[in-house]
Image: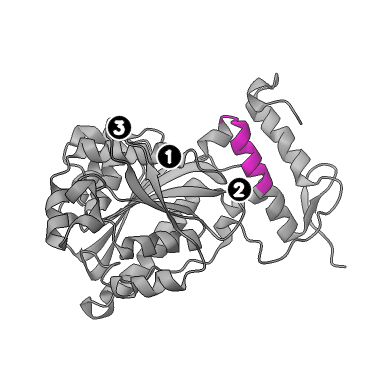
């Protein structure tokens, strides 16, 4: 079908329905594919390591991350970013991983690697790029305390500008679905929430134990669904959550929260602490985060079975040809794995056993 959906005389919705019937295999069963050819949404969810296990996890990873330079408008110094892809040739969503106040550490790179293992293209920028000694970033600063001081000196507008540059870079990557989310920790969690206020095209934001925005009138600008994940023993951060919940509800925004009893600030990095509470929180919170990202960046199994993309896939619903192609290829893969075919009336039936 060569006509673009935007130009379809019957309208994008009707043309999308026609495309559904074409890719559904109305006349005959579709051959099986190998069972390990999973879509990003079907990959098992595994928790990242704690800080103490980060280096070993990176060394053992089968994925090959790479450093890239991202142009920052108005600056001669590029932003350095660590990019890791899933070990698959299927298109995947992009997640911008926003580091803690400790900068882009091995642990943050290990988190990015685990996101790739869970089915996402992970892009972890060093937001200190160009601000360290001799124009360097996190690695150029001699102490962790020095990194903290430098990061605290970055204002919110600069953080947003840097994340916007990284987001623009991410849009040029091949083999992606075009959907983008932010996921941040501590200082980076606050930055993830702040970026959701600034970018109306962001598809989702995840906040791990980051403070909520202070200006209540800003919440009306949030377009993306936001997930907040907090430790029960993190009084400073948790004191900002209730107001955020009220303001997001007032403006009709999507804001989910979960608080994990006994866990402290930074629980995902310090999983050995708090007599097991941090580890339990890490496992539960990470699963919640990945499922949330899949829900809002991909399509659900129910959407596959209904032959309709998720409403959160804005580009598919507005008829973007590239996004429809990605969605359609995913639908075909799903059909193959479940060995389904359809009657001439397009009523789905499971193929009879051989």
Residue located beneath label 1 in the image: 169
User: Alpha carbon of mark 2 to alpha carbon of mark 1: how far?
Assistant: 30 Å
Query: Which is nearer the eye, 19 or 179?
Result: 179
**Circle 3 residue:** 221
The stretch drawn in magenta includes residue 325? yes
Mark 3 and mark 1: Cα distance apart in space: 23 Å
Identify the residue position indicated by label 2 in the image.
303
Q: Is residue 132 visible?
A: no
Looking at the rendered image, the disc whose residue lies closer to the viewer, 2 or 1, is 1
Which residue appears at 44% of the width and 59% of the height? Answer: 115
Which type of secondary structure does the marked residue at label 2 adopt? helix
What SS does tag 1 mark? helix
Q: Which mark is residue 284?
A: none
Range covered by the magenta-colored residues: 318-329
Q: Does residue 212 appear left or right of residue 34 in this picture?
A: left
Looking at marks 3 and 1 on the same chain, the residue that comes earlier in the sequence is marked by 1
Q: CA distance from mark 3 to mark 2?
A: 28 Å
The way the protein has been coloured in the rendering is one colour
């Amino acid at each position: 079908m060569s006509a673009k959906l935007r130009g379809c005389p019957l309208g994008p919705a009707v043309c999308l329905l026609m495309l559904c019937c074409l890719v559904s295999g109305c006349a005959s069963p579709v051959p099986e594919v190998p069972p390990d050819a999973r879509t990003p949404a079907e990959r098992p969810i595994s928790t990242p390591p704690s800080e103490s296990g980060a280096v070993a996890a990176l060394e053992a990873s089968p994925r090959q991350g790479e450093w890239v330079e991202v142009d920052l408008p108005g600056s001669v110094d590029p932003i350095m970013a660590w990019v890791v892809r899933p070990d698959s040739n299927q298109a995947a969503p992009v997640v911008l991983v926003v580091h803690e106040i400790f900068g882009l550490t091995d642990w943050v790179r290990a988190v990015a690697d685990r996101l790739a293992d869970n089915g996402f293209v992970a892009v972890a920028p060093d937001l200190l790029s160009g601000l360290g000694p001799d124009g360097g970033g996190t690695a150029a600063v001699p102490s962790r305390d020095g990194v903290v001081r430098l990061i605290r000196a970055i204002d919110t507008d600069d953080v947003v500008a840097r994340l916007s540059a990284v987001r623009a870079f991410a849009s040029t990557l091949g083999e992606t679905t075009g959907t983008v989310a932010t996921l941040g920790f501590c200082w980076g969690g606050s930055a993830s929430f702040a970026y959701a206020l600034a970018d109306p095209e962001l598809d989702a934001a995840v906040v791990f134990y980051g403070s909520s925005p202070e200006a209540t009138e800003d919440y009306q600008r949030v377009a993306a669904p936001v997930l907040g994940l907090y430790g029960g023993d993190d009084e400073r951060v948790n004191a900002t959550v209730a107001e955020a919940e009220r303001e997001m509800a007032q403006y009709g925004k999507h804001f989910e929260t979960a608080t994990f009893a006994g866990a402290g600030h930074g629980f995902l990095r310090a999983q050995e602490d708090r007599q097991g509470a941090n580890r339990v929180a890490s496992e539960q919170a990470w699963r919640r985060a990945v499922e949330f990202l899949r829900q809002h960046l991909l399509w659900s199994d129910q959407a596959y079975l209904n032959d309709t993309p998720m409403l959160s896939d804005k580009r598919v619903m507005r008829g973007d040809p590239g996004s429809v192609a990605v969605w359609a290829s995913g639908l075909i893969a799903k059909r193959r794995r479940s060995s389904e075919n359809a009657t001439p009336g397009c009523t789905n039936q499971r193929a009879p056993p051989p």
